[in-house]
Image (cartoon, grey):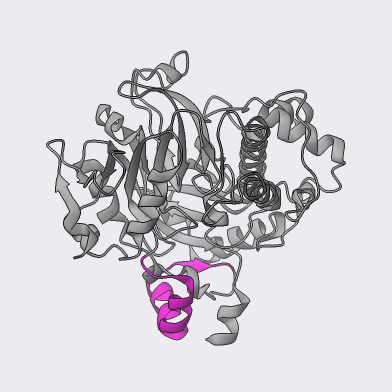
Amino acid sequence: MPWQDRLTRDAAGHFVLDPALTRGVPVRLFLTEHLLETTEENLLPQILNACAFPGVRCVVVTPDVHYGYGVPVGCAIATDGTLAMGPVGFDIGCGMMAARSSVPVGAATSERRLAFNREVMRRVEMGAGGQSRSLKHLTRAEFEAIVRGGADHYVARYGAAFDRSNAERHRIPVDDDWDIPWGGRGKPERGVSQVGSLGGGNHFMELQADQDGKLWVMVHTGSRGFGHGLTTNFFQLAKQENPALPSLDLGYFTPDSRHWRSYRNAVAAGGNFAIVNRLVIFEQVARAFFDAFGEALELVYEISHNLAQLEPHPEFGDVWVHRKGATRAFPAGHPLLAGTRWERAGHPVLIPGSNQDRSFVLRPAAGAAQSLFSVNHGAGRRMSRSAALRELDRREIEDQYRSAGILVNTDGRVPIDEAGPAYKPAREVVDAVVGAGLATVEFELRPLASLKGTDERGRRRH
C-alpha cells in the first residue's frame, strides 16, 4: 500500500497522517494532490523519524518536501525541549536576503547583466571552498565576536549599508560562558576565512524582475564551514552519549543532557554567522548593482531557515520549533513581532524557485498557526543531484536558459545538478501554501541573471 493511502484530509484543508503510524504525534502535510502523488516513496520513514525524537508535539511537512538527512528537507518539528541535529541541518541558519530597486527591467540589457555578474563575482567568491574577499584575515577573536554578536557587532565594528529594521533579527543570544568547540572531525574553524562568501550547492545570488517591471536581487546562503563543522561535531557527541541511536543522522539532546546547552549555543552562533554572511554579501552585491545600474538597492528582508527556536504556539504552548528547509511565517499580531515594524502586517517570507523559474515574496496569514507558523523555503527538489547529472543534457539545458534570457555566471554554463528541471514548479508549491491559508503572494519575481558556484563533476560528465 502506498504511504499516501494512510492520509486523510483534515477539515482545515491539509492532509493528516494516520496516528497509528506516528506514535500519536500529529503530522500535517500541506501539499496539493499532485505534489502528494509525486512525492518520493522513501519519504515516509523520514517523516516517522521526525516523530520519534523524545518530546515531539507536532510535525509539519511543507510542499517543497524531499528526501533529506534523517528527516525530510521541508519539515517543521515542535518539541517540548529536545534539540535534534537533523531537523536543523548542517547549514545552520541558512536563509534568504532580498533587495529591490526602482530600476526598470529594460535597463537590464545583456551587457549590463554581464557587467553585474562580473562585478559580483569579483567581490564575492562562490563554491564550496570559497573564501571571503571583503573580510580577509579575520583574527580568531574578531570571528568569535561576530558569531557571538551577530549583526549588532558587525554594524558597531564595520558600519552598515542597509536598514537594520528590514531583517528578521540582528543577533541570536549566545551565553557568555560558552566556548566554541573548535577542532574535532568537523573543523568549524574553516568558517573563520569564509564570512562574506556564498558557498556551493543550492546557494545563489540572482538578479530578478518583479511583476511591476522593477529589478530585485535575492541571495541564498548560510553558515558555511563553521555551521557544518559544528553540526558534524555534535552528531559525534550525540552518538557517544547514546550509542543505541539507530543511525548517526538521528542524533539529539534532551534538556538533561550535558551537551544540550552547548548545542543550543552552537545553533545560535551558527545562526549569527549566517545572518552576518548574508548582510556582508548584500553590501557587496549592492555595490555591484550600483556599478552596473547606477542606482541603490533597498534591503526588503533577511530571514533564516535551519534553526531551532523557542516560540509560543496557541495550540502547543512554548515549544522548540525546528525548521529544516522551512521558513518561519509569523502573521500580524504574533507575539514575537510585538514592537517591530511587522507587528500589524506580518513579516515578508522569501521563497526562491530554481534559477529558471519564478521566486516569490509572501506575507503570512493567520492560518499559519496550523503549520507551526512555517511555510516552505523554496520549490524543493524533484530530482536528486545524481539523477540530474545522469539524465539532463547540458546543451539542451543551456539552450533553454539562453532562450529565456537568463545569464548564468559569465560563461552561461549551468550547474546541471542545480538546473531548473531538477526542481518542482515554484508556482505549484506556492499555490499549496496559499490554498491552505498559510500566506498570500505579494511579489512574483522572474530570473534575469544567476550566480552560482559551478559543479566540476557536471562539467566532466556533460
* Position of the N terminus by quadrant: bottom left
Q: Which residues are magenta?
A: 382-409
Query: Is residue 381 positioned above or below 183 on the image?
Result: below
Q: Residue at x 36, y 49 (%)?
A: 213
Residue that appears at 41% across and 39% down: 77
Q: Nearer the viewer, residue 78 or 412?
A: 78
Residue at 25% of width from left, 55% of height from top? Answer: 428
Q: Position of residue 73 (x, y in %)?
A: 43, 53
Does residue 384 appear in the picture of this structure? yes
Q: Position of residue 413 (x, y in %)?
A: 54, 76
Q: Say whether residue 197 is left or right of residue 144.
A: left
Main SS class of the magenta portion in the image: helix
Q: Which sits in the foreground, 6 or 461? A: 6
Judged left or right of residue 349, residue 197 is right
Nearer to the camera, 97 or 190: 190
Q: Which residue lies at the image location 41% right of the left edge and 61% below the top edge?
A: 67
Residue at far front of view: 244
**Residue placed furthest toward the top:** 339
Residue 377 at least partly seen: no
> Is residue 76 within the magenta segment?
no
In the image, is residue 17 above or below residue 122? Answer: above
Q: Is residue 27 above or below residue 173?
A: below
Position of 413 compared to 79: left or right?
Answer: right
Q: Locate residue 93: give its quadrant.
A: top right
Q: Position of residue 289 (x, y in %)?
A: 59, 49
132 sits to left or right of 426:
right
